[in-house]
Amino acid sequence: MSDAVTYKYLLAANTVCARYFERVDFVEPHGNGHINDTFRVCGDRGECVLQRINPNVFKRPDWVMDNIVMVTDYLRARLDERGNAEEREALSLLRTLDGECYVTDADGAVWRLYPYIGGSRSYDVAPDALTVERAAACFGRFARLLADFPAQKLRVTIRDFHNTAARVKALEMAARQDVCDRLDGARRILDGYLDRAHLGEQFAAACGALRQRVVHNDTKLSNVLFDRATGEGLCVIDLDTVMTGYIACDFGDGIRSCAATDGEDAATAGLHPERYEAFTRGYLSALGGELTRDEFNALVPGALAMTYECGVRFLTDYLMGDVYFKTAYDRHNLARATNQLSLLCDMEARRREMEETARRLYFS
Ligand code: ADP
Ligand code: GN1
Ligand code: MG
């Protein structure tokens, strides 16, 4: 789906490769991320992943890279201390031939190179509850490994990233301006979102007094790599939004993405109770004793708020003319916003059930 955009950068990708490789065998578009342009590259340094950071989304790609250098180094050190860590359990950044952490191309865009995590795969939609539990365990472990990271060193790569109220304001503004004349076809969905602003407010209230931690902030299923052969969760990727924030944002976005009955492009979606339980179990057990009681109380509000917020963002982007998320067809962002609203309505109906399951797992 991102192919049109990604192919546009194929030539630039080849030029950038000359900074990293003595010999390049092939460069091809890879993955289904909504933001960056990702390529699989094979050359004298083996199989790698080359990414162009989306400059429309990240205004300071140098800050993104500062964070990634610190976080990948820190994760590797924590895994090394443990002794038996596999290379594939954390991302590591590859340097250019002259030792730089990233490359800036002729247009000012920033590129970076990671080793391709061998024998891995990602999913857009989970095949089963076990995969969901494994994804959750990877995200939980990620937060636990970073629990003592010096958070004040991290740059804010996207301001107000999970500030739901600010996202709603942006939606209201996009609706008022209606620059693409798309409002008429989106009014029903827009009302569905504007009627639910309280979900963001409830979540903000639940988080009010909580301490901020270092979190991933984009705990979508496709941001975990799994072992192709065993199905085990290997590694959390897509570290561009690692910043301080709330555990409940990571939990909530994980539920939104991993515990839905259908993928983000389906006409409808609901909450899959078995997958909800699997994610909650995997996440809580990987976090261990890290989670305080107040943080626990914010988890379910976080699931509703993150689903709400993501839908708000899709709809805002639809009204603004698809300037943020990559799209494959005209009404793609509207379809995504409709899908998230359908998931959200089901979560509202099952809220009591979600709370009971979470309590049972937390206190067991
Ligand atoms: P985006 O920010 O656009 O979502 P991601 O960093 O999530 O980009 O990468 C997009 C996809 O590329 C991932 O879902 C995964 O399938 C693949 N990918 C990214 N990095 C690696 C890696 N180091 N090894 C193997 N596959 C990767
Ligand atoms: C984007 O980059 P990707 O595809 O993993 C987005 C997330 C959204 C998600 C919805 C930096 O994630 O915030 O929740 O799409 N990432 C950014 O699918 O905006
Ligand atoms: Mg991604």
Image (cartoon, rainbow, N blue to C red):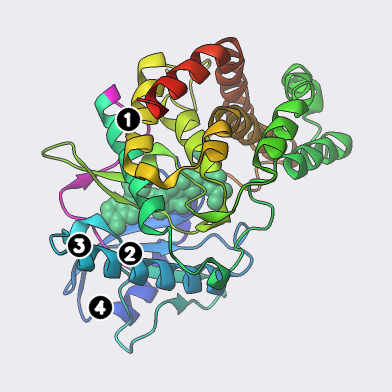
The front one of 275 and 63 is: 275
Residue 314 in the image: above or below residue 140: above
In percent of width and height, residue 236 lies at: 34, 51
Residue 85 forms part of the magenta stretch? no
Q: Cα distance, mark 3 to mark 1?
A: 25 Å
Q: Residue at x 18, y 36 (%)?
A: 231
What is the number of the mark on residue 132? 1
Residue position for label 3 = 82
Q: Cα distance, mark 2 to mark 1?
A: 23 Å
Relative horizontal placement of residue 316, taking residue 95 as reference (left or right): right
Residue position for label 2 = 75
Relative horizontal placement of residue 249, taking residue 77 as reference (left or right): right
SS state under label 3: helix
The kind of residue tagged 2 is Leu
> Of the residues tagged 4 and 2, which is closer to the observer?
2
The reply to whether callout 3 and callout 1 are in contact (CB within 8 Å) is no
